[in-house]
Image (tube, rainbow, N blue to C red):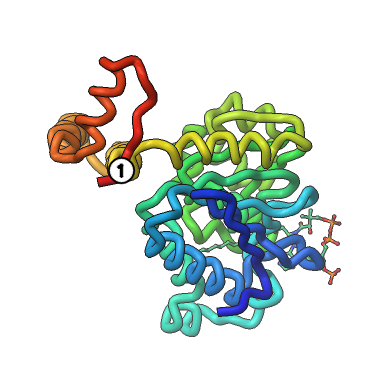
């Protein structure tokens, strides 16, 4: 598939996906989500790729789902066609994804960033769920994921008033893992991605699965789930190599098996 709305670039074991609809501030239309889904399929199928970064432009990570594409829908068509249902491909990804956000991450843009495993923000980043201004409400997990990230009061404030949160507030609230100067955004994201890519892939995937489980289950069940994955990690070659390397005072050479 030749991409028109995203660009991809591979550096070592890291694939960078740049959202690329500059005239529409990277508004997320059907084509873009289809292309991103295709890139995710390829990423997951390629054993040499171990981490993905999704980024946008300096001005916008993404200013939301494409309003012009959605405007003509009525509720029956939206329901029957499962409007924007294709987005579910993103949180189904089992390998790690980092969102590197500069500028606007609004509506579906904020939701896309929250579907990634963590968000590194430029100091220019602005997050918001402004759907209320359009007479609708978040539809890509905004009411659920944002509430889990920042708590009920702030999520209500954001979703009901449509106001934006700057990068500092997003970091204080736990929405983003770190804030860096805009010109260091991609460098920082690559540094984190390279580090993850050097780890044991099964350990990375198990860790992602276990952390995500924390949102879906009780503490006791989550701890049990973690313990089972922890035990199964002892069936990997990487466990014996990682621990032996520590004892030998050398770097581990993971085989990802
Ligand atoms: N959709 C379509 N086009 C857009 C969007 C968008 N979300 N955002 C910006 N654009 C377009 C503008 O129409 C404009 O195009 P044109 O030049 O042809 O008029 C171009 O991008 C530049 O935009 P502006 O001129 O408005 O730029 P400004 O710098 O003046 O303003 C803003 C920037 C503040 C970001 C402004 O563009 C804005 O408010 N955008 C809309 C933000 C918004 O409401 N986002 C929420 C959309 S609804 C949504 O995301 C629902 C998510 C459901 C997900 C479900 C997943 C399963």
The structure residue drawn at horizontal position 75% and vertical position 53%, both measured from the top left corner, is 57
Which quadrant would the N terminus be assigned to in this image? bottom right
Of the pair 45 and 246, the residue shown nearer to us: 246
User: Which residue is located at x 59 percent, y 51 percent?
Assistant: 11
Of 135 and 130, nearer the camera is 130
Q: How many marks?
A: 1
Left or right: 90 in relation to 33: left
In the depicted structure, whether residue 157 falls above or below residue 90: above
Up the image or down, 37 lies above or below 100; here it is: below
Residue 82 location (% of width, % of height): 44, 76
Disc 1 residue: CB within 8 Å of ligand 1: no
User: Which image quadrant is residue 109 in?
Assistant: bottom right
Secondary structure under tag 1 reads loop
Q: Position of residue 26 (x, y in %)?
A: 71, 62
Looking at the image, which residue is at 65% across and 37% down?
A: 121
- Where in the image, quadrant-wise, is ligand 1 located? bottom right
Q: Is residue 251 left or right of residue 84?
A: left
**12 or 125, which is in the foreground?**
12
**Is any atom of residue 54 visible in this view?**
yes
What residue did someone put label 1 on?
255
């Amino acid at each position: 598939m030749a991409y028109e709305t995203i660009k991809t670039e591979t550096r070592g074991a890291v694939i960078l996906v740049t959202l690329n609809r500059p005239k529409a501030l990277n508004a997320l239309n059907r084509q873009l989500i289809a292309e991103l889904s295709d890139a995710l399929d390829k990423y997951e199928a390629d054993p040499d790729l171990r981490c993905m970064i999704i980024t946008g432009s300096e001005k916008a990570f993404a200013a939301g789902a494409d309003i012009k594409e959605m405007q003509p829908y009525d509720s029956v068509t939206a329901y029957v066609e499962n409007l924007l249902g294709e987005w579910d491909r993103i949180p189904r990804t089992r390998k790690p994804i980092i969102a590197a956000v500069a500028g606007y991450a609004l509506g579906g843009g904020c939701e896309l960033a929250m579907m990634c495993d963590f968000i590194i923000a430029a100091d220019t980043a602005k997050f918001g769920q402004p759907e209320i201004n359009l007479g609708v409400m978040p539809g890509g997990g905004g009411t659920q994921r944002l509430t889990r990230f920042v708590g009920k009061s702030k999520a209500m404030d954001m979703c009901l008033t449509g106001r934006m949160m700057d990068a500092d507030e997003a970091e204080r609230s736990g929405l983003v893992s770190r804030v860096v100067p805009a010109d260091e955004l991609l460098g920082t994201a690559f540094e984190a991605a390279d580090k993850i890519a050097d780890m044991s892939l099964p350990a990375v995937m198990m860790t992602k699965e276990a952390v995500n489980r924390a949102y879906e289950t009780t503490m006791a069940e989550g701890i049990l789930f973690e313990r089972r994955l922890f035990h199964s990690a002892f069936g990997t070659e990487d466990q014996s190599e990682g621990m032996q390397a520590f004892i030998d005072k050398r770097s581990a050479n993971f085989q990802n098996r």
